Image (cartoon, grey):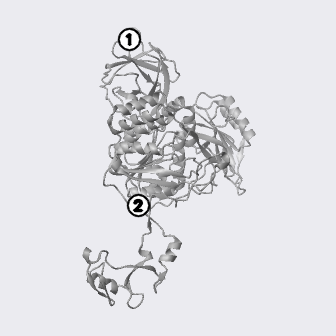
Amino acid sequence: MHESFPSQNLSPLLVFFLGRFERRPLFCLRVFPHNLPVDFNPPGVGLLHDKTGSIHIFRFLDAEFMELPFRTRKFFISGFGEHFLHHEFSLLIRHGFHHGASQKTACAAYFAGSQSHTPPQPVTLRARLCYPQSKPVSTEKNKLYYGDNYDVLKMYLKDESVDLIYLDPPFNSRQDYNVLFAEKDGSQSSSQIHAFEDTWEWNIDAERSYQHIVEQGGRVADAMRAFRTLLGGTDMMAYLAMMAPRLVELRRVLKETGSIYLHCDPTASHYLKILMDAVFGPQFFRNEIVWKRSHAHSDAKQGAQHFGRITDTLLFYSKGTKTVWNSLYTPYDEKYIERDYRRVDSDGRRYRIDNLQGPGGAAKGNPSYEVMGVTRYWRYSKEKMDKLIAEGRVIQTRPGAVPQYKRYLDEMPGVPIQNLWDDLSPLNNRSKEMLGYATQKPEGLLERIIKASSNEGDLVLDPFCGCGTTVQVAQRLNRRWIGIDVTHLAIGLIKKRLDDGFPNQNPPIRSTYEVIGEPTDYAGAAELAEEDKYQFQWWALGQVGARPTEQKKGADRGIDGRLYFHDDDSGKSKQIIFSVKAGGVTVSQVRDLRGVLDREKAEIGVFICFEKPTKQMRHEANEAGLYTSVDRSTYPRIQILTIQEILDGKQPDYPRHRVDATFKKAPKVKPEKGETLSLPWEPVKS
């Protein structure tokens, strides 16, 4: 390979990072090249060099140039499918031939651009590893995607296929959000699971994202250049560079009759509104909704010198002039009813009296005639007035008084909802729907949005779906839905929430949606384990209904997850300790789990691994004995589950005649009457 690509011809140096070949064929490469010309055409043959020293030669199809971040280019190896799964890593590449500098890099392919004798400067390239899904994506079910929402939008969603978008992206508030789970007694655990870091830094990736969006031209590029002038290379600029291409994609997938609600806080709302104007057009701005998210509080003791911050902002835009819209109302205030609807009919119906006179009199063409001895210009024709009188809808409060219209309270829809939403109960520790997810939003908020801007059967998308409130409410309101999140932890929480919320649904809730991006076979699980240890742990624990413990290095004390259960009437929670191993296993690790079990006074321990347990490992597990429940049923204290067994449906063996207490349960919901709905679209063909 050195002879084929002499160093003097390597400018710019284009490097493809490829994954392992052992378990499944690689068929798609994405790379963020350094100084790659827009008209660059790669040669038709690629040389792949793996760890064994073998050289593999593949013929590439013509490159398809797509609008992707950082001038991404996409190449296909002939003979494989079209579905993708993405994982990301970085590698520092210097001038010259280089491979094997990262354990995650199995091989590399090099192509030369134009000849130059100036060596390229060192640069960090970010590449995405893509490999086929184990099965085709169904088009008849709701979808839950694991992965970067930008990639999912690009690859799976067609133009103008979505009716409503709600997104609650991480704000640039420089804080870490964590997932808090219910501890044994129902309180929040001191262990916090890091869900995502809400910080953005201006770096080479942000610079490339900025360049990508600016090179497209148009209003969005103009807005981004103005932001750069104002903000420079700041973290806020990095946040906007992340949001801009995603908003462009969201506009692409939104129908002409669709709407989008962007949830943000005052930290970035003013910048995001300008960006939304650029993406959707200022003429399609509908509302800036102010939502009161918490009760009044004072930060004065912490030295704050500002008014209390208790609101969020929702930026509401449509894509076209004619959009789906259903007017919503709130009930009248009791004081208003007592004051304005104080009159009561003989049948008990409350009513108020209203003016029957025609505004503008004769000048507006209102007819004049006598009603109950009073002549005026009236709002209605004489025939309509006679009909209202016959129906008892016209009242004269005293002789000679101007007749009035009887407006009944039970015929009024209520107060039209305005753009100040202070009537929705905020979430707190006493809320039944509170799951402990730091950024969780109340279902009432999403119910209002979904009811106002979609109809039954419409498709709702949440590209930052977190703990799944949008998904949960869309399911209850008989909408189709798509959820996207970047962590297996969030995907596991959403699946559990749907299970708890719709326990008796027919067909079962799990059969109505499909998870795309999760490992569904041994090879996929192995690839995930190699690429991200913690994502693999979260995925594996999610498969058995356990919650992860703190992920700080060395802080788990031999515990990767816990599961709590009840098997008596004492109210005391019993616990199962989990140890998840992504690599090779030994009998000493099973012995260590026995020690952890005794230290934590746990009832059962579960050891999850790839390899089948050895005879010595099974012997060590058997030596731990049995746990005996109150009904005298027995369960092995140490249980060993392989990944393949879990994929085949095997679960930990423990008493299940009481409800488990591992996660805070989502309340059961009663879906509005409707039918099971499907998604009438197919994945985008690359």
**Where 567 falls versus 62 (above or below)?**
below
Of the image marks 2 and 1, the number of the one nearer the N terminus: 1
Task: Determine whether, in the image, residue 353 is placed left or right of residue 599.
Answer: left
Looking at this view, is 538 or 283 the one in front? 283
Return the residue at label 1. Answer: 5
Identify the amino acid type marked 1. Phe
Residue 680 in sight: no
Looking at this view, is 373 or 144 the one in front? 373
Which residue shows up at 46% across the image and 18% down it?
Answer: 50
Q: Quadrant of the C terminus?
A: top left
Residue 360, by quadrant, is bottom left
Task: Determine whether, in the image, residue 83 is placed left or right of residue 61.
Answer: right
Relative image position of residue 527 (x, y in whole percent): 50, 30
Looking at this view, is 310 or 30 the one in front? 310
Relative image position of residue 270 (x, y in whole percent): 46, 45
Return the residue at label 2. Answer: 674
Looking at this view, is 132 or 156 the one in front? 156
- Name the front one of labels 2 and 1: 1
Q: Quadrant of the N terminus?
A: top left
Whether the residues at callouts 2 and 1 have beta carbons within 8 Å, the answer is: no
Residue 73 in sight: yes
**Where 165 falls versus 154 (above or below)?**
below
Which residue shows up at 50% across the image and 49% down it?
Answer: 468
**Where 145 falls versus 351 (above or below)?**
above
Q: Secondary structure at mark 1?
A: loop
Identify the amino acid type marked 2. Gly
Determine the CA span between mark 2 and mark 1: 63 Å
